[in-house]
Image (cartoon, coloured by chain):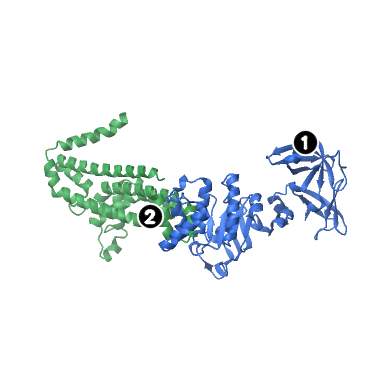
Amino acid sequence: MVYVGFIFVPIVALVYRAATAESLGDVITSPILRDAIKVTLITSLLALAITVAAGTPLAYILARKRFPGRDLLDVMIDMPLVLPPVVAGIALLMAFGRRGILGGALDNAGINLPFTTAAVVIAQVFVASPFYIRAAKAGFQGVDTSLENISQALGVSPWRTFWKVTVPLSAPSLTAGLVLAWARAMSEFGATLLFAGNFQGRTQTFSLAIVSATEVNLGAALVLSVILLGISLLLLLGLYRFAHGNTTIG
Amino acid sequence: MTLRVSIQKKIGNFKLDASLECGEETLVMLGSSGAGKSMTLSSIVGLTRPDAGEITLDGRTLFDSKLGIYIPAHERGIGYMVQNYALFPHMDAAQNITYGISRWESDKKAHRQREMVELFSLGGLQHRRTRELSGGEAQRVALARALAPNPRLLLLDEPLSALDPTLAGELRRDLKRIQRELKLGVIFVTHDHEDAYALGDRVAVMDSGRIVQTGTKPEIFRTPATLRSAQIVQTKNILLADVKEISKDSVILNINSLTLEAQRNDGIKAGIKVYVCIRPENISIIDPAFEPIGIHNTIEAVVLDELDLGPKHIVSLRTTAADVNNTFEVDVTDSQFRALDLSPGKKMGLRLWKHNLHLIPA
């Protein structure tokens, strides 16, 4: 009971104060909001696409193969989960920043990552991909290998077997991982701030816009917060509905 | 249809070294779990890569370690079925059946599906989810799925062990019929000697990664080549004896004070030790009140206990001679059992027919 109150009171307070904020109309029509939505959606969807493209094969290999260094790799992938986001931001700077260990090479290639929209995407991939990879790995592990074996014996190549058997049967886990990773990418703050900065229309995502707004206009921050809360809630509901809908199929 | 296999593989301490041939017949691979039967099958189907050797199917090389040939499973076209059936849970029965022929033209595919549904009496079940199928139905769907792409060779890995005996019996009949109708080569892996009896045209006995004996059913069950082979085919009664002398058509054996006469066979010489193998169904229990005991391969024995299996009883008896301390296991039909009134403690006679004693040099 106390716990439920503990979760609900701040959320209710947030919504109440936002609804009664004087600047409600100003914020909703402001370019800051429009830009924040645009940057957040574009970067988080890009981050998600990269996570799926690179994370899916990795999750499959971790779930199916035994090789030296596998456990180490497994732990490495989880590292961003326990790393404070600010530390992640500094780490990214040290790697890809102008004075980072890869910075010189990137500079020579004419690529400058820090404080660009690309940097936002990198930061999001860094912090969010473990959520997807973990879930995908668990999903793949839950698929009986004898199903994949039978599929191949029936003349279906390993690649098509993956799409016809492995993916459909691990779909609930893959979706859950996607939703969690997406939510994490959208709410990313610390790493983005340090590695990508806070420039409206370029690197200023929702979370960054909220923090900026609290410094000048609490009402605007409240409204932005409620919008982000609404998106999170929609994602979570979608996830539950999907997971529930799938229990009847198994 | 001719399959030739000669493969070796080492995993940890386990060494697989299997050679076999299979034509249009049912070859049963019999062995206890861990003998390497499943690994042999999965090597043939292309899911396990042997370290060395060759596999050819109708002249086509599927694997050759020397030439570096390894055809992947999906290009081998071998039917394969496993113990848990591995039906795809996200598809219905019909989708499972047509899984391996999904790239056929839709007319041909629909025709083949109808054929399979008919062959395996699956009418009305096509749109069932796999979870809603009974064990026997799931088994038939799995078989229909394996055979839909029209393989010449079908590999079955312990397909009956998850079924109750009635269903297993039905499936044995189905399998035999289908093997003949479709002129398939079938390799059937099992640890159950009854499957081997019921299904095998030939039987290959596997032990510790090696095929220790291959032959017809009578050869395998009546004349196992090694002690291990005799144990795997459930010979049950195995006695160690000295070969006393060999005459024109007999071998005279001594087990301490007991003398037995067996048929002569090659490889048995006077003075060596042999294992005498007698199957439980090949011993007769006789009533000492009517027949003399102690001559012509008869022994006095006391009934220890019995296991009632309905139509047959398994009776244990212990020899009474002080220096021949042996327990025999004898299969008795229910009517014989009641006629002889075999209660524990009763003294009976055992007749070991001369032609039923199989000798393996020890």
At which x and y percent is residue B213?
69, 58
Q: Are marks 1 and 2 in contact (CB under 8 Å)?
A: no
B120 or A59: nearer the eye? B120
Whether labels 1 and 2 belong to a single chain: the reply is: no
Q: How many marks?
A: 2
Can residue A114 be seen in the rendering of this structure?
no
Q: Which residue is mark 2?
A: A56
Which quadrant of the figure contains the N terminus of chain B? bottom right
Left or right: where B335 falls relative to A52: right
Q: Chain of mark 1?
A: B
Can residue B287 be seen in the rendering of this structure?
yes
B246 or A124: nearer the eye? B246
B2 or A87: nearer the eye? B2
Q: What amino acid is at disc 1?
A: Asp
- How far, Cα to Cα, is label 1 from label 2? 71 Å
For the point 79% across and 34% down, which residue is it?
Answer: B345
Q: What amino acid is at disc 2?
A: Thr
Chain painted green: A
At which x and y percent is residue B58?
57, 68
Within 10 Å of disc 2 (Cα), the crowding (few <14, some 14-19, many 20+) is some
Left or right: where B84 falls relative to A89: right
Left or right: where B23 falls relative to B222: left
Q: Chain of mark 2?
A: A
Q: Colour of chain B?
A: blue
Q: Which residue is mark 1?
A: B341
For the point 59% across and 48% down, which residue is it?
Answer: B168
Marking on residue B331: none
At which x and y percent is residue A121?
27, 54
Q: Quadrant of residue B49?
A: bottom right
Secondary element at image label 2:
helix
At which x and y percent is residue B268?
81, 58
